[in-house]
Image (spheres, coloured by chain):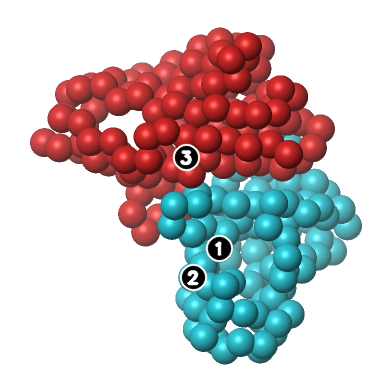
Chain colours: A red, B cyan
Amino acid sequence: GENVEQHPSTLSVQEGDSAVIKCTYSDSASNYFPWYKQELGKRPQLIIDIRSNVGEKKDQRIAVTLNKTAKHFSLHITETQPEDSAVYFCAASNNQGGKLIFGQGTELSVKP
Amino acid sequence: EAQVTQNPRYLITVTGKKLTVTCSQNMNHEYMSWYRQDPGLGLRQIYYSMNVEVTDKGDVPEGYKVSRKEKRNFPLILESPSPNQTSLYFCASSVGVGQPQHFGDGTRLSIL
């Protein structure tokens, strides 16, 4: 079955720096890759997603890149702010199966 | 307001006492899913449903049951809870497979 590996598990950056979180997936049929942000004690919320027919997508300070050949995708956050501190999860699914498989999560800490 | 509502939010119970966690969405979503969240393991899918009367196993279905008799409701049933089911549970819904999922606020279950 599908497996999603996420790295690093923790990431600490200075305010204003960039942060990059990487995920790899095993099922070549996967075609939908969302990223969720979970603040402490809150529910996960979608921040950006990408589909397999696109290589990159941006939304203000957040971008996601996808390399289908290598089966990996990454989240890039530029000009980080303290409110970006949270746990970030990547996930992968395909339209046929119905399952959504999450990575283990990355705890991002942005220091003022 | 569009939302996914879970009840109860917190529950402490004992081994073997059947319990049900309810989940309801008001967005007319076809797809609904249950996840459990444990430290270091991310979100793991328990069961999902792509439509009324259609349910499928996720990655960790053992010890759980679900039903989807109506579009808006997707209860999670623990027939004989055990301590290893102590966890934070999230219900989520989306328009369909491979679409952004909206999460409920979570249910923290402690089984003694």
Quarter of the image for residue B36 reads bottom right
Tag of residue B89: 1
Q: CA distance from mark 3 to mark 1?
A: 16 Å
Report in which chain the residue with disc 3 lies. Answer: A
Q: Which residue is mark 2?
A: B108
Labelled pair 2, 1 in contact (Cβ < 8 Å): yes
The image position of residue A86, as x and y in percent, is 33, 44
Q: Amino acid at mark 2?
A: Arg
Q: Amino acid at mark 3?
A: Phe
The image position of residue B57, as x and y in percent, is 78, 54
Where A76 sits versus B78, above or below? above
Report in which chain the residue with disc 2 lies. Answer: B
Q: Amino acid at mark 1?
A: Tyr
Q: Give the SS element for disc 1.
A: strand
- For the residues beneath circles 3 and 1, the answer to whether they share a chain is no
User: Looking at this rendering, what residue extends furthest in the right direction?
Assistant: B53
Q: Is residue B81 left or right of residue A17?
A: right
Q: Residue at x 28, y 36 (%)?
A: A11
Disc 1 packing (10 Å; few <14; some 14–19; many ≥20): many
Quarter of the image for residue A50 reads top right
Tag of residue A89: 3
- For the residues beneath circles 2 and 1, the answer to whether they share a chain is yes
Q: Give the SS element for disc 2.
A: strand
Q: Is residue B5 visible?
A: yes
Query: Which of marks 1 and 2 precedes in the sequence?
Result: 1
Labelled pair 3, 1 in contact (Cβ < 8 Å): no
The image position of residue B14, as x and y in percent, is 57, 89
Q: Nearer the viewer, residue A69 or B8?
A: A69
Q: CA distance from mark 2 to mark 3?
A: 20 Å
Q: Is residue A63 left or right of residue A95?
A: left
Q: Is residue B1 visible?
A: no
Q: Give the SS element for disc 3.
A: strand
